[in-house]
Amino acid sequence: MTQPGDEEQPAKTREVARGVFEVFLPLPSKPTIINVWLIDCGDGWALVDTGVAREESRAAFAGALAALGVAPADVTHLLATHHHPDHFGASRAYRDEIGGRIHIHPAELERIAYTLNAGPDDMVRHSRRNGIPIPTQPTDAPKPMDVWAATFQPVTEADHLLTDGEVLQIGRRRLQVIWTPGHTPGHCCFLDLDDRLLFVGDHLLPRITPHVGVYATGPENPLGDFLASQEKVARLDARLVCPAHGGVYEDHRHRARQLIRHHEARAAEMKDVLRAGPASAYDVARRVFRWVFENPNDRFQAGAAVMETLAHLEMLRARGELRRDERDAVLFYEVR
Ligand SMILES: [Zn+2]
């Protein structure tokens, strides 16, 4: 994988526990770094996530392997926390060049197939139905998705489909699969049963809350799933959390409770907005995430804010606190 001129790339790795290395890979936009995890299993290495499909990232990874004295062919297992470009975007190249066995949850393979094949029409219909005024004339504003598109070259098949609770025996390591739907439908964490390390992907980040939005194809209540997944990881016995962005930390239960409280407070704030009368997800988002809508060029962030709002509204609806009506092809939410 190394090409001429790559030698000056500084290798950025950190051993966080014996035989477990955090590898920092660059991303094209914020957050600017993703941590992938190289795990010495005695007989081969496992890699949790791959980074984006960009030369810069692949060179950094090659540099990390070289610095650790690991031959690419010794990486025998590639594990996906989830399909997003920054996490599994380079998986096709890695499988082809390194040859490791691919492990991913089936719901993530479905998302990959959808993302690679879906036209924009689905998203436009879904956005309009939730009150977003989509102009009929396309604008020239740069779209962040264009920046990401080329970075997404994922596998479309797996050697092994992950199931909740199963234990992957890789060499001397036992990694338990903890299915944590929410951020994506097939997001998985991995718990090293001997060292009590918890690899959490985007599920339990130390400083930022991962995006949880409702998309055209569902599921309908991903935030309900996400909070249930927080309760689920809070029940685990872990010593150290290894996140995809930010540094390692202790006390996963504390962080899980913070995330639950954060979203409950947001949901309560949105319910308060709706006490004034029925509104679409777009209307509610403009009130609750006012600052996001101040930059008219940032339609991507505004769209994400609406989908995040929708996730809160659908969670409240699933709990029986809101009702939903359709008027002129737009969905309106109302306090029961
Ligand atoms: Zn993600």
Image (tube, rainbow, N blue to C red):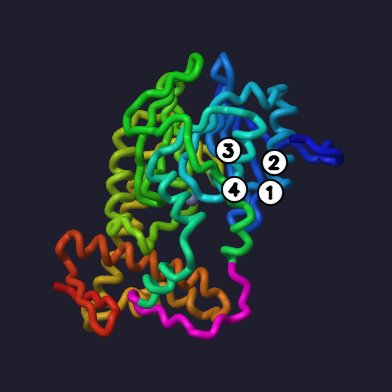
Disc 3 marks which amino acid?
Val
Reply yes or no: does residue 310 show up in magenta.
no
Q: Is the magenta stretch mostly helix, strand or loop?
A: loop
Residue at which label 3 appears: 36
Reply yes or no: does residue 138 show up in magenta.
yes
Residue at which label 4 appears: 153
Residue at which label 1 appears: 54
Cα–Cα gap, marks 2 and 3: 12 Å
Which residue: 29% across, 50% down? 225
Location of residue 272 with respect to 228 vertically, above or below: below
Disc 2 marks which amino acid?
Arg
Residue range (magenta): 129-143
Q: Where is residue 217 in the image (x, y as percent from the top left)?
A: 35, 60
Q: Which of 223 and 141 is in front in this view?
A: 141
Marks 1 and 2: in contact by CB < 8 Å?
yes
Tell me which corner region of the image, top left, top right, bottom left or bottom right, holds residue 124: bottom left
Cα–Cα gap, marks 4 and 2: 13 Å
In terms of secondary structure, where does tag 3 sit? strand
Task: State which tag comes first along the sequence, 2 or 3.
Answer: 3
